[in-house]
Image (tube, rainbow, N blue to C red):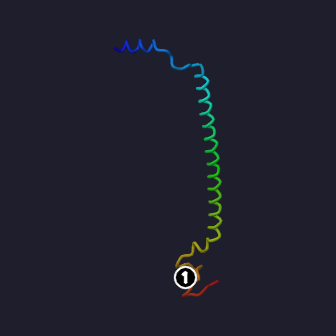
Amino acid sequence: MLQDDLDRLAKAPVDRSLSGLESAIWHNIAARMAEQRRYRSTFAAQMAILAVATVWSLAAGHQWAAAHEAQASAGALSPYTRLAASTLLMGDSR
């Protein structure tokens, strides 16, 4: 039964020419490689933008923190705060 099917398949005419198969394969390979290069370059550009944005954000945060350091470190009992309990009881020593 299987042999009959194989014989019939061997006797059947080829339905398509294979003359352009190799060039089509190489064309598809080249297209996929070009697409991968494009994705890699896009990924590299995105990572560079992310790195610049991160460094810029860190620099801006550091600058903001340095400008607001006295206010940020002032607690409820800190002598540097106008309304701190120690300042209100003893007076401002500045």
Frontmost residue, 2 versus 52: 2
The local secondary structure at tag 1 comes to: loop
Who's the residue at 65% across and 61% down the image?
59
Three-letter code for the amino acid on which mark 1 is drawn: Ala
Frontmost residue, 40 versus 62: 40
In the displayed structure, 54 sits above or below 45; it is: below
Who's the residue at 54% across and 83% down the image?
86
Question: Quarter of the image containing the N terminus?
Answer: top left
Quarter-of-image position of residue 55: bottom right
In the displayed structure, 16 sits above or below 79; it is: above
Question: Quarter of the image containing the C terminus?
Answer: bottom right
Query: Which residue was labeled with disc 1?
Result: 84
Q: Position of residue 39 (x, y in %)?
A: 61, 41
Q: Position of residue 19 (x, y in %)?
A: 59, 19
Q: Position of residue 22 (x, y in %)?
A: 59, 22
In the displayed structure, 8 sits above or below 53; it is: above
Who's the residue at 61% across and 33% down the image?
31
